[in-house]
Image (tube, rainbow, N blue to C red):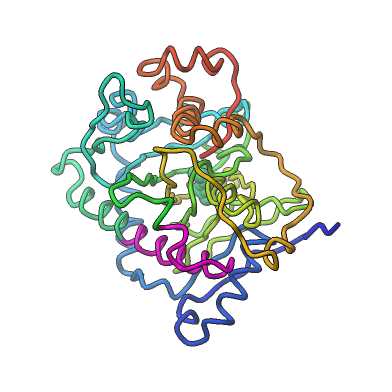
Amino acid sequence: MTTTDFTSIPVLDLAKASSNKDAFLAELQHALIHIGFFYVKGHGITLEFLDNLTKQTISYFDLPLDDKLKTDKIYSPTFLGYSIQGNEITKDKKDNREQFDFANELPATWTEGRHIHERLTGPNLWPDEDVLPRFRQSILSFHSQAQELAETLTRFVAEALGLEPSALLDRYVLPNQQHRAKLIKYPAVDQLDPQDGTQGVGPHRDTASLLTLLYQANDLPGLQVQNHAGAWVDAPAIPNTFVVNIGTGLEYLVQNVAIATTHRVLNPPPGRGPRYSIPFFLGARLDKKLAPIEIPQRILDQRPQTVVTDSGHQFSQVYQNDPGLYAVLNRISSHRDVGAKFYAQLAKDHGIITTETKTGY
Ligand SMILES: O=C(O)CCC(=O)C(=O)O
Ligand SMILES: [Fe+2]
């Protein structure tokens, strides 16, 4: 039995995928199996674009609360839109973060009788253009660039695990699927009520997705990754990189050979101001039961035997039987007010409104 005990997160250079593909795939394979996290540089999204995105993110959170509340999640069963600090729960505790969830623009199509996961799909809630000029345009441009990068990486992930490049994308991601992303602000601890603690977001694994790309938009500490022996490892901001990690969807599909590693965020230390981050989640399709893929034995043999995690594994059985229901339950569990308004019966049936537990992003 081996317990891999990483102490830092590797940096992979996407440019190397062209210049020395075998070496790139070997590094990627190691990161997938033994760490579940890596940074990617050489990703092709320009620094100028990312700097502007950071400015837009800060401008959004700096809006008067009334303007942000006009985009509140409570107005939509999609769970897209704004959530005020303290509204989200992870592992029984309130998260000290403010968020704006967004996705590629798709119309709402769910009607009574259709599968409940379709109710998660629908348009974004945007602040007025005159309140925040060019915000919508920047955010949607980020979304499409992040999606393209995530798809490129997913092809390499398949190859690194001994599969055809299209093995994951062609079968497990739909072309017209909605992928979620968010802008996040974590206030420094001196801006919090002392009894709120320092949980920016509690220990969790990213649920139902294949890959997460995270842009750490300013240079403040907070993100920590749990190694397989259970210790917390810092993942500091590295300029012009994305942090990439694996979701429980990919982990399940590849028979736990790539690990959906647990992570958390601590609020920044006093006097440092807020931390901003922007994750993009490449989702796996939610419309049918997913069967794990056949993986070459030489890869399976490297699978870690023991992975210690502080994250709960709520609903994991549901994921195997019905990924769409699982995704909805996780959203309800994180955002109880939206759940109570649009999914009251489901929340009750699964004991979510009365008992406070949650996994997921
Ligand atoms: O903000 C971060 O650094 C991580 C956020 C995260 O893990 C999530 O939202 O799933
Ligand atoms: Fe996460």
Task: Decide whether residue 113 is among the magenta residues.
Answer: no
- Whether residue 22 sits left or right of residue 166 in the image: it is right
The residue located at (66%, 34%) in the rendering is 312
Task: Decide whether residue 146 is among the magenta residues.
Answer: yes
Tell me: residue 85, above or below residue 244: above
Image spot of residue 127 (x, y percent): 22, 38
Q: Specify the principal SS of the magenta part.
A: helix
The residue located at (52%, 65%) in the rendering is 157
- Whether residue 134 sits left or right of residue 80 in the image: it is left
Q: Is residue 241 visible?
A: yes
Tell me: residue 276, above or below residue 131: below
Tell me: residue 239, above or below residue 57: below
Residue furthest toward the right?
Answer: 1
Residue furthest toward the bottom?
Answer: 19
Q: Is residue 272 visible?
A: no
- Whether residue 284 sits left or right of residue 114 in the image: it is right
Image spot of residue 130 (x, y percent): 13, 43
The residue located at (58%, 70%) in the rendering is 28
- Tell me where the magenta segment starts and ends, as one range: 145-169
- In the image, 345 versus 198, the foreground residue is 345
